[in-house]
Amino acid sequence: MENTLVISVASGKGGTGKTTVAVNLSLSLTNVQLLDCDVEEPNAHLFLKPEINSQKVAAIRIPEVDERICDYCGKCSEVCAYNAIAVFPGDENRVGSGFLIFPHLCHSCGGCTLFCPRNAISEVDKEIGLIEEGISGDINFVHGRLNIGEIMSPPLIRQVKQYTDRSRTVIIDAPPGTSCPVIGSLKGSDYCILVTEPTPFGLHDLVLAVEVLEKMNIPFGVVLNRADIGDEGVNNYCLSKNIPILMHIPFDKEIAFLYSNGIPFVTEKKEYLEKFSHMFAVIERAVNEKSSTKIKGKI
């Protein structure tokens, strides 16, 4: 099996054009898979309009206590790092004893089941969302939809990433920000494209995203969207940190019009097909250079 690249597209803040870059990059390449891991608000499908051919319910495992066996010793509550179980032992005659399970706090670690001395705890499925897979042209498309009211998206993101096809170039549309969902989306990427804008807010959140990627040891570059507005703060920061600016996308009325109508701009502005292809070649070269450096370091 050919080992192609996994490229994540992220941003320190929302609204910078992250999905726009992920979609248009996907359409500029061949043999591509796009994983929309922004499961709280997936929107890549609005532009790719895939034909969905499979759906799968996504679930996590949560504890279920058999009260006929449980003696309310409280061991499960002690080992739960997330306070997802509360136990009330009651008096010496077990009057007032009971327990509460908080499914939204459960991280499905299985610790309560493992440490229960009476084997009174089993695990049951709790539905958290939906995974849909389909085709848009020759692009394999997968996204997750987190159920309304669910507070933890990383379990669904991990299940979406299980569809990763390393025989294709994989583009991951990550959630915005720098929190746990982003970390889960970026993990395992060969390269990350950070999309930002030349404003003080854009610079502030770019700095946070850069710190995350440096900790994760993932090579990265920047796409500057709406590049002809704002100030020089982002340019100066990237220059000082030796961060490559992979592409400048101008503040273009035609691009905005196409976006508002759900049309990827590479389909109408053909010159960008070459620009995105060139950016991919730069990324491919950077990843290969990093791999070569690692090999030399081991010799």
Image: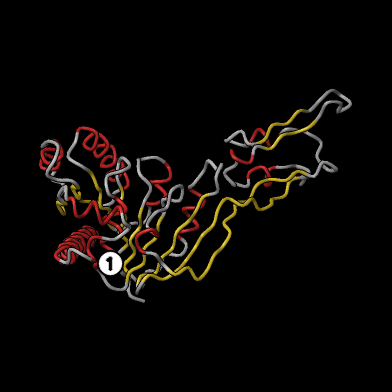
Is residue 271 rendered to the left or right of residue 218? left
Depth check: 56 or 91 in front?
56
Instruction: Look at the image and name its color scheme.
Output: secondary structure
Q: Nearer the viewer, residue 233 or 291?
A: 233
Which residue lies at the image location 72% right of the left edge and 49% below the top edge?
122
Instruction: Place residue 206 in its image quadrant.
Output: top left
Determine the residue positioned at 10% across, 42% down: 239
Q: Is residue 290 left or right of residue 136?
A: left
Q: Secondary structure at mark 1?
A: helix
Residue 299 seen from this side: no
Kind of residue at badge 1: Leu
Q: Quadrant of the C terminus?
A: bottom left
The spot of residue 86 in percent (x, y) is 69, 31
Q: Residue at x 24, y 48 (%)?
A: 195
Q: Quadrant of the N terminus?
A: bottom left
**299 or 116: nearer the viewer:** 116
Question: Where does label 1 land, which residue?
Answer: 27
Q: Position of residue 13 (x, y in %)?
A: 31, 40
Looking at the image, the residue that sits furthest to the right is 93
| Image x and y of residue 262, in percent | 33, 58
Quarter of the image for residue 143 reads bottom left
Left or right, residue 293 beside residue 122:
left
Q: Is residue 82 visible?
A: yes
At which x and y percent is residue 101?
69, 37
Furthest toward the bottom, the residue is: 1
Snapshot quadrant of residue 268 = bottom left
For image coordinates 22% across by 63% down, the residue present is 266
Q: Nearer the viewer, residue 106 or 171?
A: 171
